[in-house]
Amino acid sequence: MSAATSIVLNGDQVFGYLERIWWVALRVGAMLMLAPMIGTKMIPARVRLILALAISAALAPMLPSAMPVTGVDASTLLAVARELALGAAIGFIFRLGLEAAGFAGEMISQGMGLSFAQMADPLRGTQSPVMGQWFTLIAGLCFFAMDGHLALIRVVFDSYSLTPNGSLAHVFEAIPLFAKSMLEAGLTLALPIVIAMLVVNIAFGVLARTAPALNPIAIGLPAALLTGFVLLVVLMPRLVGPLQEWISLTAASAAAAVR
């Protein structure tokens, strides 16, 4: 075999590369466990493990050298816990970003009278209103269509240059602030339809007081449902812009949390 085609493997280099992949996989794997859509029960744990190892193998050559392992001591355990916490913080912030859409869907379902229509939600692992599930699914599809998954990997990659030692100084401050922003974003998404449904319900309430013989309660629920669905069809194309801005803000907040 010629020198041009032969491959020489150095044992130290191979084990050093595997060690670097292992350290990167800690942060990437924790991120994928809480990432939107990917970290849900719909994706098997084996698939998430393979995906974490593949992403770690791709990112490891471009990242700084991994922390040398001196044995199973306190410093190593603290370093592992720090990597897991940083990855979990990044994935949790992105998960909160998509929960804004689910929160908006739950508020709209209450105005439309669909809050009693609940089903098992595979995305959350619990029961939730069908309108909240629909909004969460739409937000998840927009997340992938707008390259939100690439922004997620970008934040993980940048976190090594922002925090070479894995600082947790801003994590516990950034997550509560972002949760407040998530509630505000969900309310903003749902506010037009919620106000319209409030007007419809008030109108039927006034009609019930002035003309009870018409039995407005019996026609109030179908009218609220029809009005809600019409407003959803009309306003859904206009939600793409706010969702794109919200995903960008989510990525910026996740990057600021791990600085």
Image: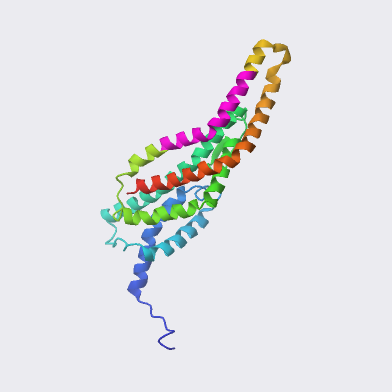
Camera-nearest residue between 115 and 253? 253
How many numbered marks, from 0 up? 0
x%, y% of residue 209?
65, 11
**Residue 237 x %, y %:** 59, 42
Q: Is 14 on the left or on the right of 211, as rendered?
A: left
Secondary structure mostly taken by the magenta-highlighted segment of the chain = helix
Q: Residue at x 38, y 77 (%)?
A: 9
Nearest the eye: 129 or 187: 187
User: In the picture shown, does residue 240 fall above or below 22?
Assistant: above
Q: Which residues are magenta?
A: 179-203
Is-magenta flag for residue 53?
Answer: no
How does the figure colour the protein chain or chains? rainbow
User: Is residue 24 shown left or right of residue 49?
Assistant: left
Q: Work out whether 64 lies above or below 246.
A: below
Question: Residue at the spot x=29%, y=50% of the render?
Answer: 167
Residue 207 falls in image quadrant: top right
In reply to whether residue 185 is colored magenta, the answer given is yes
